[in-house]
Amino acid sequence: MPGIDYRAARAELRLAEVLELLGFVPCTRQGQQLRGACPLHGTHGRKSRSFAAHLGKNVWYCFRCNRGGNAPELWAAVTRQPLHAAVCALYRRLGRAAPWLAAPRRERPARGDTMPEP
């Protein structure tokens, strides 16, 4: 299975996109900072403010379950999938191609060099 370039995925995937897919509705907003009910542990109270998301920094944290991270990690946690499967699913859901790592090139012996005998 090819590897995902997680550095590129973290840079490309926006927390705002993931929150929109999850149907997150903040109860308060101060600039780029959103507060509301945590999509992980199931609090659905209208005034719950245990979940904080900073859209500018692209990070989130829940003060109740003490978990946090970036957009791909939130999607993985909510969908209860390993990170690789969650990132693939998230890109499919957003209709984009996932950033794959290039396959490593095999070293070829220089001309005249022979391969060692096994």
Image (cartoon, rainbow, N blue to C red):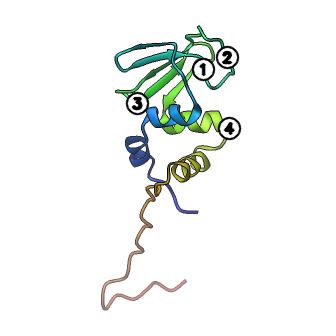
Residue 80 appears at what percent x and percent y? 68, 38
Q: CA distance from mark 3 to mark 4?
A: 20 Å
Please tell me which residue lies in front, 115 or 17: 17
How would you rate the neighbour count of disc 3 (Cα within 10 Å): few for under 14, some for 14-19, many for 20 or more?
A: some
Labels 2 & 1 near each other (Cβ < 8 A): yes
Please name the residue that numbered disc 3 is placed on: 58
The label on residue 38 is: 1
Disc nearer the start of the sequence (2/4): 2
Q: Is residue 28 left or right of residue 43?
A: left
Q: CA distance from mark 2 to mark 3?
A: 22 Å
> Looking at the image, is mark 4 or mark 1 nearer the viewer?
1
Residue 78 appears at what percent x and percent y? 63, 33
Labels 3 & 4 near each other (Cβ < 8 A): no
Q: CA distance from mark 3 to mark 1?
A: 16 Å
Q: Amino acid at mark 1?
A: Cys
Q: Amino acid at mark 3?
A: Asn
Please tell me which residue lies in front, 67 or 112: 67
